[in-house]
Amino acid sequence: MEHMNILQRMEAKASSFSKGQRRLADYITNNYDIAAYLTASKLGKEAGVSESTVVRFAYQLDYDGYPELQKAIQVIVKTNSNSMQRMSLSSKRYQEKGVLKSILTTDMERLKDTIHFGIDEAEFNKAVNLINDSRRVYILGARSAAYLAGLLGYYFKMLFDKVIVVETASTSETLEQISNIGEKDVLIGVSFPRYSKRTIRALQYASNHGADTIALTDNVHSPIAEYADSILVAKTDVMTIVDSMVGPLSIVNALVSALALLRKEEVEKRLMAREELWNEYDDVYNRSNQ
């Protein structure tokens, strides 16, 4: 049961459900986008069952209480909902608190989840060592994840000589850009629901050609995790037409900082050279120069 999502768990246990539990299971299946953000009491009311039935239902599905069941429903929302469904859902979520406080609160909660239920320090250290020992670093993120990949690439170019941020619009072009990947190389793939097939196939290709692979994603069962030597888990959440990416962004910051400390002397020389370049061409605002 551990690796099943909530829909699969309900299907597997359906024969043991009481009448009320069947009613609750039907409601969740048909209205998971609404159920994902209801309290146990409100979910029971919407499904026509008692709050105690909802709580018992969570244990029946082998969850450690209702909060864990609720998070499992939210995973389904993130994975299955399209952009229009997300827009409709978010309008309901933000009516009470307002957009600004709701977004900031959600970001804060996902950072806490990333610390407590996401990133594993041993996996993080493994990823840092793989990158530090690599010959070339390839970074790939599609759609919204492309901005995380670009930021990681921007800072990595301060640390390493050979950093390639893969920027393409199709799977074939992606594979062309990483066609020379091999042993001693690292591919970092960044993907969150809804997952990019382009990124999945790129990690598979890199793994098959002897490169080390790192997945920055939302859970260890993510489709890109299957081809990763190291999995960095950062929790995200559904917002309007965007996702909460503060968790992944913090992991990006941590990777850059950890590698900068490992390569301290080299990085200091690189940064000094950049500062001299910026000053020579007057590229950075300095109040004393005004």
Image: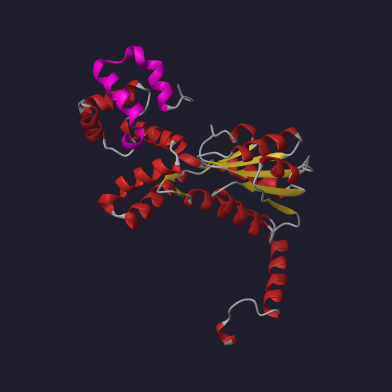
Q: Name the image quarter holding the N terminus.
A: top left
Left or right position of 34 against 249 = left
Q: Residue furthest front?
A: 84
Nearer to us in this view, 128 or 79: 79
Q: Quadrant of residue 256?
A: bottom right
Verify whether residue 288 appears in magenta.
no
Nearer to us in this view, 286 or 8: 8
Residue at (52% x, 52% y) in the render: 249
Measured as percent of width and height from the top left, residue 136 is found at: 75, 49
Q: How many marks?
A: 0
Residue at (51% x, 36% y) in the render: 219
Main SS category, magenta section: helix
Vertical relation: 64 (above or below) 12: below
Left or right position of 43 against 209 = left
Q: Name the image quarter holding the C terminus.
A: bottom right
Q: Residue furthest top?
A: 15
Measured as percent of width and height from the top left, residue 240 is found at: 40, 49
The boundaries of the magenta stretch are 6-35
Measured as percent of width and height from the top left, residue 280 is found at: 71, 80
Left or right position of 264 against 193 = right
Vertical relation: 23 (above or below) 110: above
Q: How is the image coloured?
A: secondary structure
Q: Quadrant of residue 215?
A: top right
Residue at (62% x, 55% y) in the render: 150
Vertical relation: 2 (above or below) 182: above
Left or right position of 251 against 44 = right
Verify whether residue 34 appears in magenta.
yes
Residue at (70% x, 70% y) in the render: 274
Nearer to us in this view, 197 or 104: 197
Measured as percent of width and height from the top left, residue 63 is found at: 37, 27
